[in-house]
């Protein structure tokens, strides 16, 4: 099955959905993102107590695309699914640093909020906000078992 190009990211990079994401399900997947965003107060930038996170995602989708948001969450979930999770939360690296690992792995932009939403969607993944003022979270990821380029 070929992968259909379905949009472009903020920098003009083509956004494609892997076969695991049915193009017809983009709206339902985006609604799932909005549900988590509303519940956990996660905007595209990360945790946000000041502004409505759903409005942030809707603005993000209008300037990029819903497909781009769905793709970023999918990439994050795929990367996370290859990790090992520990009991304690690792407070040595925040979601912002981890989202950069996802970007390097797939060579594609991922927002901090998309990474956090992916974490909140997966069983066994725990997230703790860095501080009340921070956009970032700490995750219970093992430092030893994380995918690196060429291992997927």
Image (tube, rainbow, N blue to C red):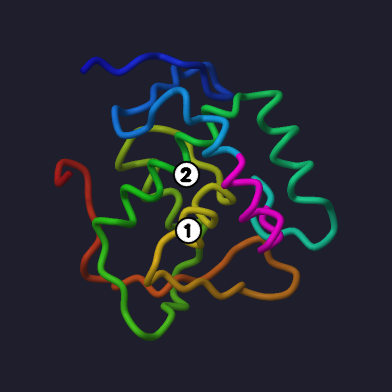
Q: Which mark is residue 113?
A: none
Residue wearing tag 2: 73
- Mark 2 vs mark 1: which is more N-terminal? 2
Magenta region includes residue 39: yes
> Magenta region's main secondary structure?
helix
* Residue range (magenta): 31-42
- Residue at image x 38%, y 26%? 17
Label 2 or label 1, whichever lies nearer to me, is: 1
Query: Is 63 displayed left or right of 88 in the figure?
Result: right
Picture quarter containing residue 38?
bottom right
Query: Is 138 displayed left or right of 40 in the figure?
Result: left
- Mark 2–mark 1 CB contact (< 8 Å): yes
Indicate the secondary structure of the residue bearing disc 1.
helix
Picture quarter with the N terminus: top left
Residue wearing tag 1: 121
- Residue at image x 65%, y 46%? 34
- Residue at image x 49%, y 52%? 115
**C-alpha distance separating marks 2 and 1:** 9 Å
Measured as percent of width and height from the top left, residue 107 is found at 35, 33
Q: Nearer the viewer, residue 49 or 101?
A: 49
Measured as percent of width and height from the top left, residue 82 is found at 24, 56
- Residue at image x 38%, y 50%? 77
Measured as percent of width and height from the top left, residue 120 is found at 51, 62
Q: Is residue 83 above or below residue 32?
A: below
Picture quarter containing residue 30?
top right
């Amino acid at each position: 099955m070929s992968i259909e190009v379905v949009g472009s990211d903020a920098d003009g990079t083509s956004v494609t959905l892997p076969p695991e994401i049915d193009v017809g399900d983009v709206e339902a997947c985006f609604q799932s993102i909005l549900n988590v965003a509303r519940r956990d107060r996660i905007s595209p930038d990360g945790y946000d107590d000041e502004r409505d996170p759903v409005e942030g995602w809707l603005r993000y989708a209008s300037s990029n695309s819903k497909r781009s948001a769905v793709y970023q969450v999918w990439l994050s979930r795929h990367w996370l699914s290859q990790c090992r999770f520990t009991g304690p939360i690792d407070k040595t690296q925040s979601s912002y640093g981890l989202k950069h690992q996802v970007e390097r792995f797939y060579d594609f932009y991922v927002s901090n909020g998309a990474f956090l939403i992916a974490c909140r969607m997966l069983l066994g993944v725990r997230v703790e906000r860095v501080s009340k003022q921070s956009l970032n979270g700490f995750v219970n990821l093992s430092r030893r078992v994380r995918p690196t380029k060429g291992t997927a």
